[in-house]
Image: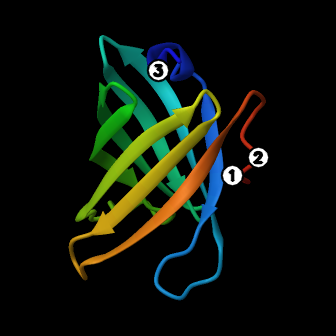
Amino acid sequence: MDAKSVLASGSTWVGEFRFHESETLPVEIVISSEVGGNVEAIYRTENKFEWEISGTLNGNYIDWRFVSSKHPDGEPLIQSGKLTSTLIDASTMEVQFYDASDMSSTRFTLTKVTTASSVKR
């Protein structure tokens, strides 16, 4: 698998996550660009929170950092978390999110879709 081609601009990865004891909520990563192993994307959760993320590709592993955010009311979101991804195959991405503010974490699986996002905007 060529990870760079799997992360082509516009590729959309969707799934669901559960954090703490919450209900299952939608999540997606939309790839904006991949150049020389540097990946830019949008990370959306719960149909309302959005972050620009930037990642470094190392084999099939991506170490992301949060760049900026967009809250539904226009206020910036503070993000103290860490996000990492592992490409399992050309259509499956395993993601781990760690929240440093309360030392909790969650893992979830995203599936690559070839059409517009299935997450409501």
Which one is nearer the viewer's eye here, 32 or 86? 86
Residue appearing at x 65%, y 47% in the figure? 14
Residue 53 sits above or below residue 109 on the image:
above
Relative horizontal placement of residue 112, taking residue 37 as reference (left or right): right
Residue 84 sits above or below residue 78 on the image:
above
How many residues crowd around disc 2 within 10 Å: few (fewer than 14), some, or many (20 or more)?
Answer: some
At label 3, the amino acid type is: Ala
Give coordinates of residue 106: x percent, y percent.
Answer: 43, 69
Residue appearing at x 25%, y 82% in the figure? 102
Give coordinates of residue 1: x percent, y percent.
Answer: 53, 18
Q: Name the element at disc 1.
A: loop
From the image, state whether disc 1 or disc 2 is nearer to you. 2
Residue beneath label 1, please?
A: 121
- The answer for how far apart the CA atoms under marks 3 and 2 are is 23 Å
At label 1, the amino acid type is: Arg
Give coordinates of residue 90: x percent, y percent.
Answer: 61, 27
Circle number at residue 3? 3
Residue 51 sits above or below residue 12 on the image:
below
Give coordinates of residue 91: x percent, y percent.
Answer: 65, 33
Relative horizontal placement of residue 5, taking residue 101 as reference (left or right): right
From the image, state whether disc 3 or disc 2 is nearer to you. 3
- The answer for how far apart the CA atoms under marks 1 and 3 are is 28 Å
How many residues crowd around disc 3 within 10 Å: few (fewer than 14), some, or many (20 or more)?
Answer: some
Relative horizontal placement of residue 72, taking residue 11 as reference (left or right): left
- Do the numbered discs 1 and 2 sit on residues whose CB atoms are within 8 Å? no
Residue appearing at x 44%, y 61% in the figure? 71
How many residues crowd around disc 1 within 10 Å: few (fewer than 14), some, or many (20 or more)?
Answer: few
Q: Name the element at disc 3.
A: helix
Disc with the residue nearer the chain's start (3 vs 2): 3
- The answer for how far apart the CA atoms under marks 1 and 2 are is 9 Å
Residue beneath label 2, please?
A: 118
